[in-house]
Structures are given as structure tokens and as C-alpha cells.
Amino acid sequence: MSFKDLKLNRPLLRAVAEAGYDNPTLVQEKTIPLILEKRDVIVSAQTGTGKTAAFALPILQSLFDRQDAPKKGKQVKALIISPTRELASQIEENFKTYSAYTNLRTAVVFGGISIEPQKEVLKKGLDILIATPGRLLDLHKQDFVNLDYVETLVLDEADLMLDMGFIDDVKKIERLCTKEKQVLLFSATIPYKVEQLANSILTNPERIEVAQNSSTSKNVNQLLYFVPKKNKIELCLHLLRNTIKGNIIIFRRTKFGVEKLEKTLVKNGYKADSIHGDKSQTARQDALDRFKKGDVNILIATDVAARGIDINNLDAVVNFDLPNIPETYVHRIGRTARAGNKGMAYSLCSADEKTYIQTIQQLIQLQLDVIDEHPYPLDPKAKPIVHKSNKTGSKHKKGRKSEASKKKKKRWY
Ligand code: AMP
């Protein structure tokens, strides 16, 4: 199937061709016709499947005929709600790319930065608004956003949105829009609470499932290092010195771990930056920009902070901590070996992570190549470390968490 078969108009086809897309992806093929028919849809698809264009293109197509409303008279007709600022910015970039040859206006609003410039942008009038929930409600309360004309409401990354506690905000936003609107719900997974939300705000939705890709690319060379937990940083430094080259993302499970590793790498002369949930919006965006521009070649991230972010074409992915959810392993290493390139994945496994390796290998139906030749081998008989409770006194007890972390107790990512 080609984009022409999807009956997109010329300005969109031109922009899509210039973006280098040859053919629609599976999720686009399945979803675009339904959205053009004004159906409500529930789409379960991961980032990387082309899901943003799957809703952006039909939205632009539907608005195209009315693109020439006098600028100040433009009203928000499509509203896209996204859980994080990075994702919201990325969606805006996509809309801008695809609408380059139209007169449709797009803007993004999110928290963590000054609200005043956003008010100015809204005053000028626009067709498509991308927003994080809190800032949108704030702007609505102050009367800078009118949602009476919203024809299409998109909830992107709905599962993450609910995990982050935005359920009430999302429901409120839905009620502020007109009743007749079309609702499009996109989610990587559809757990019960997403299902419940869908039942309460979608009308007779069509379901689209883009099969979870549980296989890892044959082009990724996946290596496994058994190592005592206490030696992981040393092994990581050893591998960076001798083996791992190019643009690298290193995944850790907690923001505390991310910060600790970043400090060590920088101290050892590596060009590294990091993203995690405690960093300000500007700091996270700066880190991404520095990585994309090549000012740093190592990005250390938690899974949640990296989720949905368009950092692909990496030379290597390092699983410093192994994920306890096996699908996360597949997502992580899917960021390398794109478009026929070769990629490397290095997994560091301590005694207490051995069970994770088993479930990962079951999911991907592949045994990872174990590398024994390294300076910090794990004694095969080593038992998982049992964490002592605080009562017995951990040596890390004091000063282990950042101030921001203490304030936001629930956020670990
Ligand atoms: P998404 O899943 O929306 O985050 O998209 C992942 C990446 O795929 C983005 O870099 C898009 O620019 C790219 N993309 C989206 N649709 C296509 C397509 N039809 N062909 C090639 N690349 C695409």
C-alpha cells in the first residue's frame, strides 16, 4: 500500500515524501482510513511503529479544507494530550513536518516553563493544540484556551498518562470538549484501567492492535556479561574503554542509578548526559539536544524518561540494569540496528537479575551470547544479595535520595 492509496491530499503527500517515508507503516495503514471515516479508535501500538503519523495525517487531511480561516479566527479543532513534555514536543514537530505545505497552525503547551509566551501563541489562534494535561487545564482556567470547537481529541500514551496519575485531568479535559467529538486513544498496552477509561469516553470504538514485536532484530549482536553488582560500574568503564564505541544509550532502572553513573562517567572523561524524571524540562531537553547534536555520545536514561523519545540509530544499547519486564528489553534494544544497520546490545547481569534474563530469553526465543572473558566474572554460585531492611541500617541510608526525589516520593523514574 502507498500513501496515495490512503487518499491523502497532495501537500501532505509531498511532506511525507520529503520526510523520507516510502510507504505507510502497518499502524498507519490500519488506522488512517478509520480516522478519516470519523470513527473512534483504540490503538495499541508502541512508539516506533509510526503511530504519531497515524493520527496526525488524517487529522491534517480533515482540517485541510478549512485551513484558510482568518488567522485570529482560528479555533482549536484537534487537541492532542500527551503525558510528558518531551513527547508533546515531538508530536508538535511531527505535525509541523507533515503540515509544512498547508496553512494549518500547530502549537504545543506544557508545564515546567513560563506560561506567558504560551498565552501569546494561543491568542493568535491555531488549529491543532498539543498539550500536557496540567498546563492545558491551567490555561483553560485562565480563559486562554477554548475547547468548544474540538472535533478530534487524541489521548496519546494513555497507559503512561494513567500511570503518571493524570486520570482525573484527562476526564476533565474530555468533558470540556464538545460531546460530538471523535476520540482517538493510543496506548502501548491496554491494561484494565485504560480499558475503563476507553469505555467511559469513547463511542463504539474500532480496535486496532499492532502486534507487540517480541522478536529482536537479527542485526543486533546481543551480548551478556555476568558480573557482581558491586563491579558493574567497573565493567561498564572497562567496556567503554575497550569495546563499546559510537552513540550509546545506557539504561538504568532508577534515577538515582542514572545520576550516579553519569557522575562516574563524566569524572572518567566521558562525554555523557542523562534524562530522568527528576530533571527539569529544560535540563532534559538540553541533554537530548546535546546527544542528538553529538556534543555527548553517551546518554544515560531510565525507561520511563526515554519512553517515546525519538532517539534511534544508536550504535549500542547498554542494559546496565536489566529490566524486570521482558518487553522493556525488546524496546530498549530496538533503538539500535534500525534501517538495516548493525547494532550492539550489552547486558550486565548480577546474581539477583538472573531470573530476568530467563524471562527475556523466553520472550525473544533466543539465548544471549555470554561473554566470560572479562575482568569481573560472577561466581556462578553467587547468591542474590538480600537487601537488609532499614531497621538494620543500610550504609546508604542517609543522603541517598535527591531533594526532589524525597518530595515526590511516588516517582521513581
Ligand atoms: P512514532 O512511532 O510515531 O514515534 O514514529 C517513529 C519514527 O518513525 C519517527 O521517527 C517517524 O518519523 C518515523 N516514521 C513514521 N511513519 C513512517 C513511515 N511511513 N515510513 C518511515 N518512517 C516513518
Image (spheres, rainbow, N blue to C red):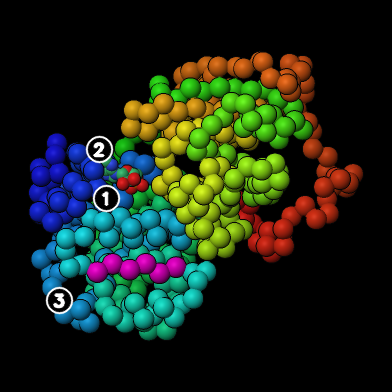
Query: Magenta includes 109?
Result: yes
* Mark 3 CB lies closer than 8 A to ligand 1: no
**Residue 231 in the image, given as x and y percentages of width and height:** 75, 30
Q: Quadrant of residue 184?
A: bottom left
Image check: 231 left or right of 271?
Answer: right
SS under mark 3: loop
**Residue 183 in the image, given as x and y percentages of width and height:** 28, 59
SS under mark 2: helix
SS under mark 1: helix
Residue bearing the label numbered 1: 53
> Is residue 304 visible to us here?
no
* Mark 1 CB lies closer than 8 A to ligand 1: yes
Rendered view: 30 above or below 166: above
Q: Quadrant of residue 215?
A: top left
Type of amino acid under label 1: Ala
Rendered view: 89 above or below 28: below
Residue bearing the label numbered 3: 69
Q: Residue at x 33, y 68 (%)?
A: 107
* Image quarter hosting the N terminus: top left
Query: Spatial distance from mark 3 to mark 2, Cα to Cα?
Result: 34 Å
Image check: 292 left or right of 51?
Answer: right
> Is residue 247 visible to us here?
yes
- Point out the frontmost of discs 2 and 1: 1
**Residue 254 in the image, given as x and y percentages of width and height:** 64, 46
Residue bearing the label numbered 2: 26
